[in-house]
Image: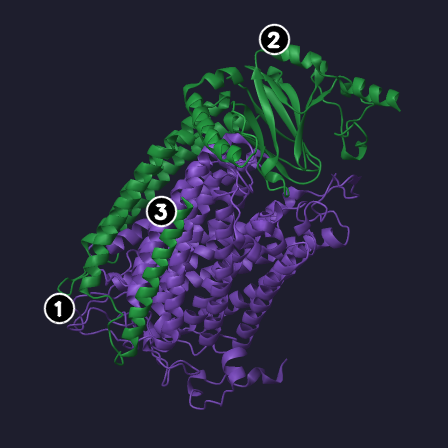
Amino acid sequence: MTAFLVVLVIILFGVAVWQMNKIFQMSKTSPEKDTTEIANDKDNNVNGYLMLGFVLFIYVLSIVSFWKWWDVLLPVSASEHGVEIDQLWLISMVLIFVVGIITQWLLHYFAFRYRGKKTQRAVFYADNDKLEFIWTIIPVVVLAGLIIYGLFTWTDIMNIDTDDDPMVVELYAYQFDWRARYGGEDNTLGEANVRLIEGVNQLGVDGSDPNAQDDVIVNELHLPVGRKILFKMRSQDVLHSAYMPHFRAQMNCVPGMITQFSFTPTVTTEEMRENEEMVAKVRKINEIRRDNSKDLVAKGDEPLEPYEFDYLLLCNKICGYNHYNMQMKIVVESQEDYDAWIAEQSTLAATLQKEKESK
Amino acid sequence: MSANAHVPAVDHEDDHGHHHKQTFITKYIFSTDHKMISKQYLITGLFMGIIGIAMSLLMRMQLAWPDHEFTIYEILLGKWGENGVMDPNVYLALVTIHGTIMVFFVLTAGLSGTFSNLLIPLQIGARDMASGFLNMISYWLFFISSVIMVMSLFVEAGPAAAGWTIYPPLSALPQAMPGSGAGMTLWLSSMAIFIASSLLGSLNYIVTVINLRTKGMSMTRLPLTIWAFFVTAIIGVVSFPVLFSAALMLIMDRSFGTSFFLSDIYIAGEVLHNQGGSPVLFEHLFWFLGHPEVYIVLLPALGITSEIIATNSRKPIFGYRAMVASILAIAFLSTIVWGHHMFISGMNPFLGSVFTFTTLLIAIPSAVKAFNYITTLWKGNLQFNPAMLFSIALVSTFITGGLTGIILGDSALDINVHDTYFVVAHFHLVMGISALYGFFAGVYHWFPKMFEGRMLNKNLGYVHFWVTAIGAYGVFFPMHFIGMAGLPRRYYTNTNFPYFDDLTDVNVVITVFALITAGAQLVFLYNFISSMFHGKIGPKNPWKSNTLEWTAEVKHIHGNWDGPIPHVYRWPYDYSKLNKDESDYVIPGQDYIPQHIPLQDNEEELDH
């Protein structure tokens, strides 16, 4: 690839130098006030055809991109509301592709069709109220539809209804890692403030708050499938963003403020690993990793481990030098597995107690 | 009050006779002549553009081949590229300074500064700007801010690296990243000076357009270029001061212990005293400028292409009044859509709904503009000068990038692609590439006006155009896919964990296209420099254009016209207008009627 690139750049540079040289020669012998730098019929003809070629290039580029890279896109949504988002996404995409294909065609085809000729006369056509009205009103109607659809979806997602008793989980961001805090048996998070950070109490939870005693702090997010989760986001230092692409979920973590987002996971990690698209994606990634491993082994390094899919929580707001490496694993599992897992975790009260004893 | 208040204004038209002797310094450096100032803007902008584009190439190489060691890093980045490995901090610095330079220094000052200065006086028929002195100050403030921005690259701890949006607390706390120390101080100082420069320039443009139009040049006879520059200047005056206030408060938070944007922070092992501030407030203030800024960048480009497309189609621009109305509508709406950058910032979701509504509304005037451009081409007699090619390509990228805006403007859809490469692809196409095309179109079209009749070489222009046009789509179309794959932007490398390993191919393709496209800009650079000195001298009105600048003297003189200023009798788009019995053009054998030609007996007066 690199060699190809180098060759291309060299060729291009060579062409440029050759052209420049030619131009330079020509410019020396140029008479005053000439019109050679103004497009003539030959230029119009050549560039007219190139315009037609260009719109075809755009179409081919789109088709090739879809054909080659369709498989890198996100798999089916693993959350309830994500299905709605994907639906709206599809409708919008189809719409913009139709509009894009038509308008690009008209633009470039007209450029080709009406390329200038000495004998040709342009039509003096300055305005037409009817036409302009039509193409004002069509976007108005279409966009009104999209706006209404979009706003309903948005309101559904963002207006969190706490009547159906969501499980409360705090996502806590700091440079450069994540912690999750569960409300415990009472499903209520204890008060917290960065001013209370001390020793093992990394999240600054108020140890005297009765709600805080059964809180569980972990560095791997486990979610029971089918249960609505209410995330409360907090940040310790700078802006971060909790981005969970597979769940179509994202919210910024803002110091001094608690933000929230809610969704219901619908596909367990195991199920997602067996998903056809995901199997193909993982296979492709593993092939790439095997190839890379060969180079590593040749250099005497350890080969890369084979990859297995896991949901990820990524940081998606620039937060410092290690921004690119700030993720947390998310495990979606059955209620039983989740219960078994959470039972093994130590509560805040127990952790604080242990610290006191060790002193 | 003033003793001079009753002295009758000296008629400016009479003072063209006495040219005082100019020294090198008054002519080339501290010039008050708008034509020279415009060239100063252009060349400073180009210089900054070279830095900005070079930075993007370094980033692209890092993203495509994260494990490869490039000696070029060590050469250009010094201690941050030791042994050919790029430091993550300097990657973020490149991201930040690339954005800042391209948005403000190249596409605001370089584009709008160059062409507003050159064209406003020439196209409205004025001897110079309303205040030549303020105009000079405006340029020199811009120059100083450019120098400070470039200097900040050489600071010990590195330049600002918190992204061009400099969200606090990251930008406010040197503990959070090294770039938020002296580098950020210089960034903020540079931008404060830049804003002062921009305001002086904008006020000057507004006053000039309102007061100094020649006789007969009513607002509805203004070329669309002038409408665009005029409205751009108004948006600038409305929104830049807000960024200034945000910058000022950020400076206070950084240096004087205030808490406008900071609250509840524990960093580097200690709790900060700040309490009660809100980073979201900064986001509001920043985007109150930041969004109109997009249109400050784009509108001049659209104005330039309106003029160039009409001239080279040999047809009037279709729907002149609709074009003006859509410029005004875009300008108005641009000031009430900033919240679409903040759907998931933690602000009230109801506000998100409001901003979705206003944002999607802005698609309407934009669509009208695109359709009107296409109709202008219809049944024209298109002259494919390089400027025309760039103008058509602008319409193409404006459509492509604008359409993905419909997705991003929809708050529900934004949730999952916010801050991914989908956004990067979208805004580079719709404002970056489009505005750059407008810039190139303007340079190719008005080069003869800037350099006393010399023209850019057209064949080099064609090479430059076609490589750039293909390369730009080659870079930014595939980029949508890695965005839809969920890849966050501003990641130093995407291969640190395995999930995005399959995107390496796409990244390599993008980078190869980027390198080729940047190579094509060298062709332009060569063309520009050699044509400045050796370009062929073309006819006085090479593109057979109607606007007034082509009636001005080819040789640059103070006052533009060596005689009285021409009066205007018609709008600027009488191309291919036929006489009453439709046997020939109004002026036989000539398909255009410049604005200073009075109404002929054999033509119908039309109300446009």
Helix, strand or loop for disc 3:
helix
Q: Nearer the viewer, residue A85 or A201?
A: A201
Cα distance between the residues tagged 1 and 2: 88 Å
Name the residue at the top extreme.
A336
Q: x and y percent of residue B113 in the render?
A: 48, 66
Q: Chain of mark 3?
A: B
Front one among B128 and A40: A40
Instruction: Tell me the amino acid under the disc marked 2.
Output: Glu
Chain identity of mark 2: A
Q: Can the viewer see residue B297 in this picture? A: yes
- Tell me the tag on residue A336: 2
How crowded pointer 1 is (Cα within 10 Å; few <14, some 14-19, many 20+) is rated as some
Q: Which residue is mark 3?
A: B399
Nearer the camera: disc 1 or disc 3 = 3
Which residue is label 1 attached to? B584
Q: Amino acid under label 1?
A: Asp
